[in-house]
Amino acid sequence: MEKKIARQLLSIGAVFLRPEEPFTWASGIKSPIYCDNRLILSAPDARAVVEQAIADAVKKEFSQAESLMGTSTAGIAHAAIAASILGLPMGYVRGEAKTHGRNNRIEGRLEPGMKVVVIEDLISTGGSAIEVVEALREAGAEVCGIVSIFTYGMKKGLERLAQAGVRNHSLSNLDALVEVAVEDGRIAPEWKERILRFRDNPSDESWIK
């Protein structure tokens, strides 16, 4: 399944590998990979595969889930579609509380003690997902874990998730993606080790040389 999802993401350009001409992230880090999982929503075939995989992951990994909560904004649509497949309630967590009306940060019904799963599109350093988890916990929810579409598998992200006591299940990851990219001729085989070296130490640009 990891490779199947990776192939879908590559085929629609939701994940793009460009090791010979690195992208520059907002942090200034040079990266061989760029991820925009919002493109899944515009690709019906890939969307059907991904959303069913999210629903299946929730059932398998977090069978006690009573509601899905999307991250704002990228996780909202995925949470809504997967919740529809599962017949579960859904909601989402804003980046910050509204400044009008009821000043909600969490949208959708959330009862104290409700078991929820967070739906996220991408896990990199884990910071935004953890903020959502903490907001839900403060509101009295029991967060079973996170289901994300893709993860880079960066050490910082793994450590932060562990420290927050939250389990993440990603449909696919950088290791699977690189394997598929080599198999399909999207990148030269010699780039595999260099891209994974970037994953292990993003601030070290020696992988470029």
Image: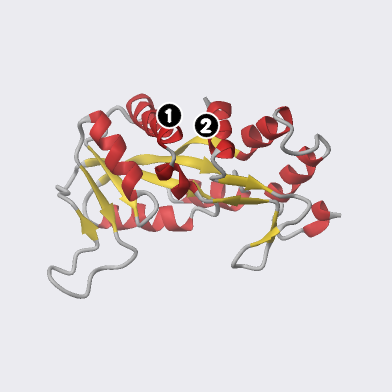
- In the displayed structure image, the side of residue 183 where residue 105 appears, left or right: left
In the figure, residue 99 lies in which quadrant? bottom left
Please tell me whether residue 103 is drawn above or below residue 50 in the rendered image: below
Q: Mark 2 sits on what residue?
A: 5
Element at label 1? helix
Foreground residue among 17 and 69: 17
Residue 12, given in percent of the width and then of the height, sits at: 54, 40
Q: Which residue extends farthest right?
A: 209
Q: How is the image coloured?
A: secondary structure
Kind of residue at disc 1:
Val
Query: Mark 2 and 1 residues: CB-CB less than 8 Å, in contact?
Result: yes
Q: Nearer the viewer, residue 167 or 73?
A: 73
Q: Residue at x 20, y 42 (%)?
A: 114
Label 2's element?
helix
Label drawn at residue 49: 1
- Quadrant in which residue 174 is drawn: top right
- x and y, in percent, of residue 31 in the image: 69, 56
Q: Quadrant of the C terminus?
A: bottom right
User: How far across and how far down the image is residue 207, in percent?
Assistant: 80, 52
**Front-most of residues 168 and 160:** 168
- In this orientation, which residue lies closer to the viewer: 45 or 74? 45
- Asked whether residue 166 is in view, the answer is no
Numbered-mark total: 2
